[in-house]
Image (tube, coloured by chain):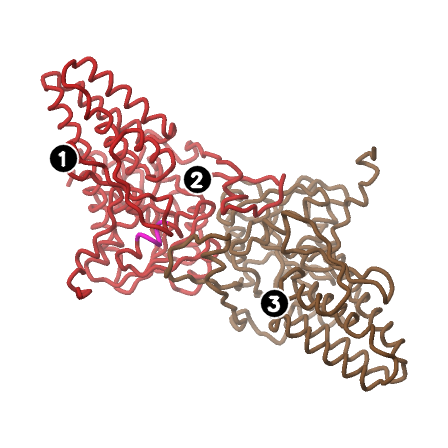
Chain colours: A brown, B red
Amino acid sequence: MMRKTSCTIEGMIPVKTIEWRGDLDGAARLIDQTLLPNEVRYLDVRDVETMWEAIRMLRVRGAPAIGIAAAMGMVLAVRDCPPICRDDFVAAVNRAAAYLNSARPTAVNLSWATRRMQALVAAHPELTIEDLKERMLIEAKAMVDEDNAVCQAIGRFGAALIKDGDSWLTHCNAGGLATAQWGTATAPIYLAHAAGKRVHVFADETRPLLQGARLTAWELQQVGVPVTVITDNMAATVMAQGKVQGVIVGTDRMAANGDFANKIGTLGVAILAKEFSVPFYVAAPLSSIDMQLESGDLIPIEERPPEEVSEGFGRRTAPPGVRIYNPAFDVTPHRYITAIITERGIVRPPFRDGLRTLFQHTSTP
Amino acid sequence: MMRKTSCTIEGMIPVKTIEWRGDLDGAARLIDQTLLPNEVRYLDVRDVETMWEAIRMLRVRGAPAIGIAAAMGMVLAVRDCPPICRDDFVAAVNRAAAYLNSARPTAVNLSWATRRMQALVAAHPELTIEDLKERMLIEAKAMVDEDNAVCQAIGRFGAALIKDGDSWLTHCNAGGLATAQWGTATAPIYLAHAAGKRVHVFADETRPLLQGARLTAWELQQVGVPVTVITDNMAATVMAQGKVQGVIVGTDRMAANGDFANKIGTLGVAILAKEFSVPFYVAAPLSSIDMQLESGDLIPIEERPPEEVSEGFGRRTAPPGVRIYNPAFDVTPHRYITAIITERGIVRPPFRDGLRTLFQHTSTP
């Protein structure tokens, strides 16, 4: 019988959301998030149609993870192309890009990743088709490494803010399951935990789609981080009881002044944190910060179908015909933020100056 | 074909949650709230066992409504008693009280109502058994009238605070479905609507048990009050967008200084209302104000089973084995309250003085 302590380090490494297994003949392995938390099933994806379906059906979700899935999908799409005619190969690459982009038309990372693969092929007319396939696989794997590097850097800066014995609250899933492995908002927690700090997490369940209860709670549980699920409307109470020492969330898009969009409910949590003098942190990779955007007022908010609220659990929970408002995101003004945690360091107010300085350093630390 | 306008007044009267139909041979008619909002079914309850089951299974819920149901249950329990031996009759009354109290042991209004019926019988040794039965029915009906009078008085005071075109937000169901008909927090809305003011309501869905989405939205919809359901974590956004002109909630128990317990999530809404300078009102019948209780710190908070959070919708939404915190209520400090609306008038800060003055007037207005 294996002793628990013998696999402590292994157990502290978060679940791999998506990775490439083997060489060019291998497969993209991803965890099917539609089955979580009730069933843990890994899919070995071996053709582009299956990858398209996995993206479409949210088996893989979260901007960075979708980008990686699309890049691997490109590899799957062309790996069996005959090594004869370069024009045919380029046409196949372009068809694969258009096809994968159609899986979730509004996901920016999807087209970003497919364009990156197209650019790679275009940039190397000197390579053989077989070599191009290998380079595409290397590129897809590099995207995993880059994502891990960014998340781990955020994790190192953020972990320093966590004290032994702290409880932190998070909202939605800016976790490993939204990236290759470490997450943005969860990376500081994973690294603090791995460093031996005792840290407990309150996971808001995050209505309507329950990413906090289904995903964040699950992934933290896998590595043994103590986690307590609460409904969104309990956040005020746990803060009032003095049970929360920090809040950390991710962001879908941050403006140059620090205002940021994130999953609906983030604004409320930010206001509560201010009221109870709990530090409020945003984990924001540089790729999510749009320095062209002056303020959060300019961020458009997607409204989603009312059925997510009224029939989100397989049975109707609001009267037929009733009006439902279902904004997917909210915008939190920068005045509620204690600090922004990026892969290049921690930014404190005034945020406009701090973010500008960050982007002026073109090299990574 | 009936024209819609011909039944406008009728349509403005809220749904009757519970009423006695007919004479002593009649029945207690109540709406089965476990089927809402998907099915509207009225139950004609003709025996005490059925009433016990209706209370137990939450077909009727809400403190005032439960009290009335218990009183009517007492009538049902003894109406077929032979009119021979008074001792046997008193014993039957006492058995019925104990039996009904066991339906929901922590519901204060249940034992309050059954004690009131026992006291009535004890106070009238001069009456025949047949006359006692009639008096018990009169008493049960009087409880409906008293509840309506209290709620309507709160409604009149509160309606004056609502301006034409306002949107108000409410949390949980302190509505007609928790009382005989008018509700506490909803009565001002019903009366403003009936007076021709245009008033729209945001109903927080109110996790975990969704009383807002299931019940408040439904009952407002029945009388044509425009209502929009939002998840709890959207309250900040609708306030930030300037869409909310007032918040009104009920209370389970208020202390002498105005601190009050109410459904979990109320505290968060109160803090948001303060942040966005939206007036925050508490509808509080005198029966819910405990002048012996110095402050809200002394109010015990019931924790409920984790399954309400993790399996509230017929399928599991959090990983097996994860810790869940499920407090049923929270306590909102009085500093977040703009005014308390009672059946004797509106109390503004300082609340301790205002509430004391209110209780010194022993007669109703």
SS at mark 1 in the image = loop
Neighbour class for label 3 at 10 Å: few (<14), some, many (≥20)?
A: many
Q: Nearer the viewer, residue B285 or A219?
A: A219
* Location of mark 2 (residue): B329
Label 1 marks a residue whose chain is B
Is the C terminus of chain A in the top left, top right, bottom left or bottom right quadrant?
A: bottom right
Nearer the viewer's eye, disc 1 or disc 2? Answer: 1
Q: CA distance from mark 3 to mark 1?
A: 66 Å
Q: Are marks 3 and 1 on the same chain?
A: no
Alpha-carbon span between mark 3 and mark 2? 35 Å
**Residue A136 against residue B17 in the figure, above or below:** below
Residue A2 x/y as whole percent: 83, 35
Q: Amino acid at mark 1?
A: Asp
| 1 and 2 marks in contact (CB < 8 Å) | no
- Residue B308 in the image, given as x and y percentages of width and height: 50, 41
Task: Determine the residue positioned at 68% across, 71% down.
Answer: A110
Dot 3 corresponds to which residue? Answer: A253
Helix, strand or loop under label 2: strand
User: In the drawing, what numbered circle is on residue B23?
Assistant: 1
Under mark 3, the amino acid is Arg
Instruction: Tell me if I can see residue B291 in this picture.
Output: no
Residue at 83% x, 69% y is A137
Residue B260, magenta (yes or no):
no
Q: Residue drawn 10% across and 19% down?
A: B128
Which span is picked out in magenta?
A: B215-219
Q: Main secondary structure of the magenta part?
A: helix
